[in-house]
Amino acid sequence: MIDLIDECGEDLASCGYETIKLGKISCSKLVVDKFNAKKIGFNEGHYFVLKAPIDFVNLENFGAQLFAELSCRLKFLLKKNKITKKDKILFVGIGNPEIMADSFGAAVVNKIEILPFKKSNRFIKIIPNTFSNTGINAYDMIRLLVEAFDISAVFLFDALATTEISRLGTTIQFNDAGLTPGSAMNNFGLPINRETINVPCFAVGVPLMISAKQLVKESPKDLVLTEKDVKDKVEFLSGVVADALMEIL
């Protein structure tokens, strides 16, 4: 299973695939319909992929540019799905927060600000961890919370896998198609999307892992690699994503 839609190996022209350059950032956009969903193995919906330079952490004012581009496109997805600033939102940090390369989801959720003691609070956030650690599927937890708290939309944050080493920590993929936890490592959880949860599900992910087999064919199939500066990239990118959401929601 592939996490990044533009690494699926299929011709994406029928999805309206286009890439534009925005300063130091490139932005790709795709629209997956029912036919193409079966063809390429990704859920129906709008997908955006932002790619930054490898040394972006050290670039002056880069965070502000990334914030602006991310906010603009997230606004589009919210408007498309008729989500307003009056709706109740559930934020979910997918992955194992104890493993740095899998902690992006938890890092974003921890930076989301909530006002639990005010009636005006519209945000709920959880970090369900992994099924192997808790015995509970993230899907089951999310579905119960959506029903119990009359949630209007779900935001899912997760660390992804890539097939290209240059994309480690330099790419943000986001969509209104949801996600399947653990799919890149073939540890398939239940899909979390509008069809299964009955509310719009937005997914934001950053590739932080690569299979060693992508680099050395003789490597064990379950060996996964990450960068030595993964902590810095998780901190930087989770902050930009959280700030963008707080601004538009």
Image (tube, grey):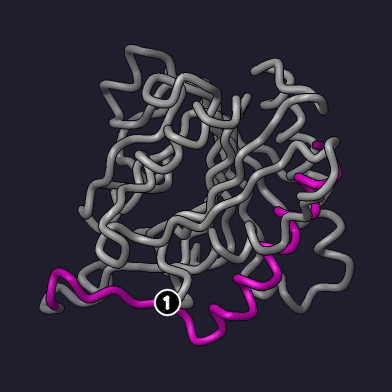
Write down the quadrant of residue 56 in the picture: bottom right
Across and down, in percent, residue 47 comes to: 54, 32
Residue at the spot 53% in from the left edge and 44% down from the top edge: 156
In the rendered image, which residue does mark 1 sit on? 99
Residue at position x 55%, y 29% in the image: 176
Is 248 covered by the magenta stretch?
Answer: yes
- Tell me residue 68's x, y (percent): 84, 46
Q: Above or below — where is 148 with respect to 25?
A: above
Furthest residue toward bottom: 228
Q: Which quarter of the rendered picture does the C terminus lie within? A: top right
x and y percent of residue 244 in the render?
Answer: 79, 48
All told, the count of numbered labels is: 1
Q: Position of residue 169 (x, y in %)?
A: 55, 67
Q: Nearer the viewer, residue 17 or 57?
A: 57
**Range of residues picked out in magenta:** 220-249
Q: Residues within 10 Å of mark 1 (few under 14, many from 20)?
A: few
What is the quadrant of residue 143 in the picture? top left
> Residue 26 or 82: which is nearer the viewer?
82
Vertical comparison of 132 with 88: above or below: below
In the image, residue 206 sits, relative to residue 77, either above or below, namely below
In the image, residue 33 lies in the stretch drawn in magenta: no
Measuring 85% from the left and 36% from the top, which residue is drawn there? 120
User: In the picture, residue 39 is in which quadrant?
Assistant: top left
Type of the residue with mark 1: Ile
